[in-house]
Amino acid sequence: QQPVQSPQAVILREGEDAVINCSSSKALYSVHWYRQKHGEAPVFLMILLKGGEQKGHEKISASFNEKKQQSSLYLTASQLSYSGTYFCGTVPNNNAGNMLTFGGGTRLMVKP
Amino acid sequence: DVKVTQSSRYLVKRTGEKVFLECVQDMDHENMFWYRQDPGLGLRLIYFSYDVKMKEKGDIPEGYSVSREKKERFSLILESASTNQTSMYLCASSFRPPSYNEQFFGPGTRLTVL
């Protein structure tokens, strides 16, 4: 079952903040975040693991609440380059060696 | 520079035709994936391969098959294309395990079945 992302779409002005949420009906081992710009391939942003470990290489922060089975991506002081569609991917706790299930995506548009 | 390439950016086929989509990665990744992307539905996994000649079904394998004869190459086959297979197809690769490692995506193939 796909995780549910909210909101489905958001429009911001440059410099504003946004939060994108990803909720699962299952207990999770890890949550992954990707961004896809229009006409391009999805690009990795971050992995959050059960127990608090994080892997990422961009100045974007995220949280992982294991009890609530959800993750949030925080985009602060947004820039025009943040525009795109954000996807979360989840790995359930009972299948930690296995592949991701992606959410439906959140479209973010940052305007000047 | 890390690379995943796909054989075509755009493809137009007729109903009933056999369609081959090819993906090549140069990162020596064990895992390779085929996804289908449709508006509002995100990325849905069709098939996954964790080694040469090994494959596992994803969430929507019906109407598709795959082949992995070499580590760097993963092919998606539509045995008899149908109009409901019109979509964007994305290939990706990663190190093991996929739960812990980032996936690198190719540019996608937009397939139209008439």
Image (tube, coloured by chain):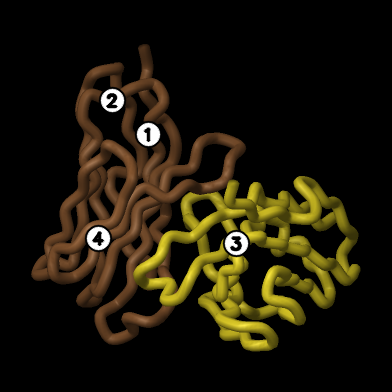
Q: Secondary structure at mark 1?
A: strand
**Image position of A101 (left or right of B27):** left
> SS at mark 3?
loop
Mark 2 — on which chain does it sit?
A
As shown in the figure, which amino acid type bears the numbered disc 2?
A: Ser
Q: Quadrant location of residue A58? A: top left
Q: Are marks 3 and 4 in contact (CB under 8 Å)?
A: no
Report which residue position mark 3 lands on.
Answer: B27
Q: Name the residue that disc number 2 marks.
A: A78
For the C terminus of chain B, the image quarter is bottom right
**Amino acid at dot 4:** Leu
CA gap, disc 4 to disc 1? 21 Å
Q: Which residue is mark 4?
A: A48
The residue shown at (25%, 74%) is A29
Quadrant assignment, res B81: bottom right
Identify residue type, mark 1.
Answer: Leu
**Where does the image place residue B20, in percent across and percent down from the top left?**
82, 67
What residue sits right under mark 1 in the picture?
A108
Which one is closest to the eye, mark 3 or mark 2?
A: 3
Residue B91 horizontal/vertical position (percent): 63, 61
Q: CA distance from mark 1 to mark 3?
A: 31 Å
Q: Residue at x 21, y 30 (%)?
A: A76
